[in-house]
Amino acid sequence: MTSITFHGGVNDIGGNKFLVEDKGTKIFMDFGMSFSQEGQFFSQFLNARTSNSLIDMFDLGILPKIKGLYRRDYARHMGFDGDEETEIDAVLLTHAHVDHCAYISFLRPDIPIYCSEESKLIMQNFDETGSDQYLTLKERFQIYENNKGEISRATGDKVKVPRRIETFESGKEFSIDSINVEPLPVDHSIPGVHAFILHTSSGSIGNTADLRFHGRRKDDTENFVKRCAESDLDLLLCEGTRIDVPPSITEYDVESEVAKIVNDTKQLVICGYPVRDLDRLLSFYIAAKNTNRYLVIDMKQAYLLKLFDESANLKGHYPSPTDKNIKVYIQRGSWGLIDKDIEKFTERQLLADYGTWQREFLDYPNAIDYRDVQKNQKDFIFYCSDFRLQDLIDVKPAEGSSYVRSLTEPFNDEMIIKEKQIKNWFVHFGVINREDDWHQIHVSGHGDGEQIKYVIENTNSKKLIPIHTIHDEYHKKWHSNVHTVNQHDKYNL
Ligand SMILES: [Zn+2]
């Protein structure tokens, strides 16, 4: 018998955590964070306590209470056993968006994570440019005796533990004990997204992951639908994030609409887009090329492009960070020594201004800083993230500059307040003078109603369970055999 327990990702957008059990084989599909569940209890200054994170999260119903699943350092310290063996054979990761992957950092490092190479590199980017622990765990609550004979808290290399990551190839089936897994690429708003078809002892199960048809990888989604139809699915887990909305523009329209605005702009073009959406980066890159400008990216994006460029399989899929149409923006470091007297502060101090991962960009032939952008405004499309708007103070956009916002529109009160604040920055610098100076050019990573209807009808599954949605009424309208589940429900195939 085969069953699926839905520990998240139902009646909710994201937080997917589906436990599949088949003849003693146990695998999770995704282990993501639910924004809505975290938002119910937590905020910027109110979080699970480091000393008790697992128990805090169990108590609030955010993480499932399963022995042998979580990091031993946490489990032992927090009185949740930790000495037992694990029963979980693997986690299959659809993609590296936090609503699918964030809670991997709570898992034991010996539970293998199966993912695409793209997802692995994105998680590496998270770890190395921030403080995440996807590929390498930093064990907590460990002590050692120092050379004075005192008990000290262990940190740094002493506590680093690599996580087991297994990369799969698109379309190439592999097995985890009794379950055969077919990873199939689909179109979404981050590289390397894979839907799955699981061939189990009691039938086949499809999981759409997050998908759409209006990006650069429409054919991939088309092929997934076709493979589902050929696999005679017993059950399809089908996303429905935007099932209630009409069709939108495509990623190619984003590219050409951005180019139009750039052509109409006499000075600097400033833009914001999701930092890890490399297909969107490509839209701005192409728009820059077609308008004879350089795309100026930040160091985080440069680092991600570098990781992709160094991979034998992925080289050439996206521009390299030294591409002739790209400039890498060197932001002010912690002391801001970039424009200070180097004779006084020394080269060594300048380097100390930056993290290890950032330092090599200082020597790139295409590295620039605010002085170059300020001086030659009409030559650039300048990427400015919502978290580094202070760069505008250095760059000083001239009269006749514009801003293109290529990010999701606000859908809750918190986001509306945040967007208002962002607008204030551009109004302050005279980039936004009237309502129609605000150029919102974006397409979602999720299929609209027509697209999801197409997936439901053409995958031809015997049964359907809606996931990643709060609108299962559409699934019910378009499929005669829909089963709706609640969080923690178990469904037997
Ligand atoms: Zn998602």
Image (spheres, rainbow, N blue to C red):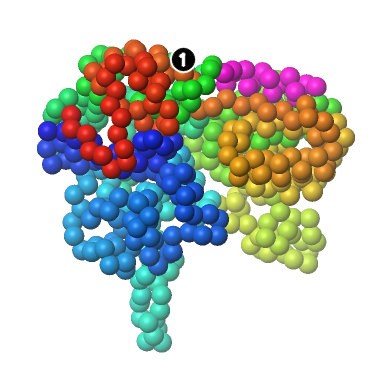
Which of 298/178 is in front? Answer: 178
Apparent side of residue 296 relative to residue 485 in the rendered image (left or right) = right
Apparent side of residue 60 relative to residue 328 in the rendered image (left or right) = left
Q: Position of residue 37 (x, y in %)?
A: 43, 47
> Looking at the picture, which amino acid does disc 1 mark?
Glu
Q: Is residue 414 magenta?
A: no
Residue sitting at 60 percent across and 45 percent down? 414
Q: Residues within 10 Å of mark 1 (few under 14, many from 20)?
A: few
Visible in this render: residue 390? yes
Considering only vertical position in the picture, is 439 above or below 82? above
Looking at mark 1, is its residue's CB closer than 8 Å to ligand 1?
no
Q: Position of residue 304 (x, y in %)?
A: 53, 40
Considering only vertical position in the picture, is 102 above or below 71? above
Secondary structure mostly taken by the magenta-highlighted segment of the chain = helix
- Residue 51's quadrant in the figure? bottom left
Q: Which residue is mark 1?
A: 450
Q: Position of residue 351 (x, y in %)?
A: 65, 59
Q: Which residues are magenta?
A: 248-264
Which of 22/218 is in front? Answer: 22
> Which image quadrant: the N terminus?
top left
> Which image quadrant: the C terminus?
top left
Apparent side of residue 207 relative to residue 334 in the rendered image (left or right) = left
Most extreme residue toward the right is 399
| Secondary structure under the numbered disc 1 in the rendered image | helix
- Residue 183's quadrant in the figure? top left
Which of 13/141 is in front? Answer: 13
- Residue 271's quadrant in the figure? top right
